[in-house]
Image: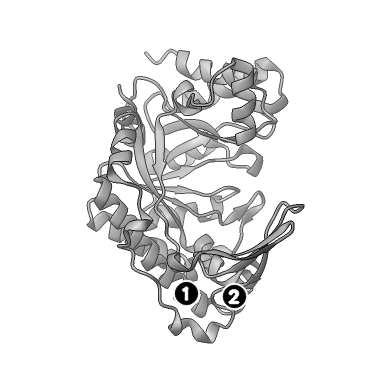
Amino acid sequence: MQSKERVLAALEFRRPDRVPIYDSYWPEFVQAWRRHKGLPEETSISEYYRNDIEIVTPREEPFLSRAGRVEEGAGWSLDRTGWGATVRHRADAKFAEVLDVALPDKSRLDDLEFESPALTSRYRPVGEVEKLKARRCVFVKTGGPYLRTSNLRGTEQWLMDLAEDASFAHDLAMRVTRHITAVGLEALRRYDLYDTGIWFFDDMASNLGPMCSPRTFERVFYPCYQWMCDQYRAAGVKHILLHCDGNLEPLLDMLITAGIQACHPLEPKAGMDVVRLRARYGERLAFLGGLDNAHIMVSAPLDELEAHVRRILAIGRDGGLVIGGHSIGPDIAVERYDRVNRLILECDHS
């Protein structure tokens, strides 16, 4: 099987020739890998490890033309983002300081005017994406209503909005949802990726659970997810995937009802055990990820590492799984990741 056929078989609970692979890699891991292998800079780590998925990310920012450098000085710069925030970067700081946001006053909601989803500058050239499609299974990536809406209010204020004024939070989230959905639909049209699909990246949970209660999610975000999924279904999109770090389990039933078909990355450190979840959901939900990149892949004895990988692989023999450790950082030794990759590729799938 080629990557696209392999991934689609897995998502549709058909038996692939092997369990598909999808991982992303920190730059520090890539540097260590190149040094360890003695490989030139142009070598693709995704191709080396036979990753089966590629994502294409259009620029969703509602104020795309306003983004850019405002001012700079010795060791600092002031920038405006495409989400309308002004941020200060310091050379000695890891994170940027947010000075203001696009919507500091919620009474000004009706004044927000987003730039057109059809702007050519939002999208990669079609020719580039065609080259990716020839090698891997390609999905369009957009954000989701929780995370993208927070850009307009700031993280702290957005959490307060969810607690204090669910009606306003829903109205703002739905406005953002309509915009990012229009961008996603335009990307799917340009690249003709209806037969693979759309992948929402919406980090709305910590290791302990969702950032809002299930009741708040139902009031504010469930209608957004349902509307998004309905729009994509009506357009002929085959697969709708969700990425969310942390423990999303209290919201999974609602997300499935809304139209989500697959979930990523299933972090063991957050209690998201993919084997247990498969037993609970059967073929109602496919999974991407499942490997423990925080403990087992980092430092567990090799026999424990191999047992962990084989346990996850076992639930993917008849489909329903794309295996991976989500993000591979510099705390994972190249030799250990090599061992994981070999186990996946050499697994007897007969």
In the figure, 92 relative to 315: above or below?
Answer: below
Residue 172, numbered label:
1
Name the residue at 34% across, 64% down. 227
Q: Circle 2 sits in a helix, a strand or a loop, which is it? A: helix
Where does residue 163 sit, x and y in percent of width and height? Answer: 61, 74
Name the residue at 37% across, 29% down. 319
In the figure, 94 relative to 151: above or below?
Answer: above
Position of 341 compared to 349: left or right?
right
Callouts 1 and 2 close, C-beta under 8 Å: yes
The one nearer the camera, 340 or 101, is 101
Q: Considering only order in the chain, which callout, 2 or 1, is on the residue closer to the N terminus?
A: 2
In the picture, the quarter occupied by the N terminus is top left
The one nearer the camera, 87 or 262, is 87
Where does residue 3 sit, x and y in percent of width and height? Answer: 34, 27
In the figure, 328 relative to 284: above or below?
Answer: above
Q: Circle 1 sits in a helix, a strand or a loop, which is it? A: helix
Q: Which residue is mark 2?
A: 161
Examine the rendering and report whether any part of residue 243 can be seen.
Answer: yes
Position of 239 compared to 241: left or right?
left
Position of 85 compared to 208: left or right?
left
In the picture, the quarter occupied by the C terminus is top left
Q: Residues within 10 Å of mark 1 (few under 14, many from 20)?
A: many
The one nearer the camera, 98 or 42, is 42
Name the residue at 39% across, 21% down. 18
Examine the rendering and report whether any part of residue 237 can be seen.
Answer: no
What residue type is disc 2 on? Asp
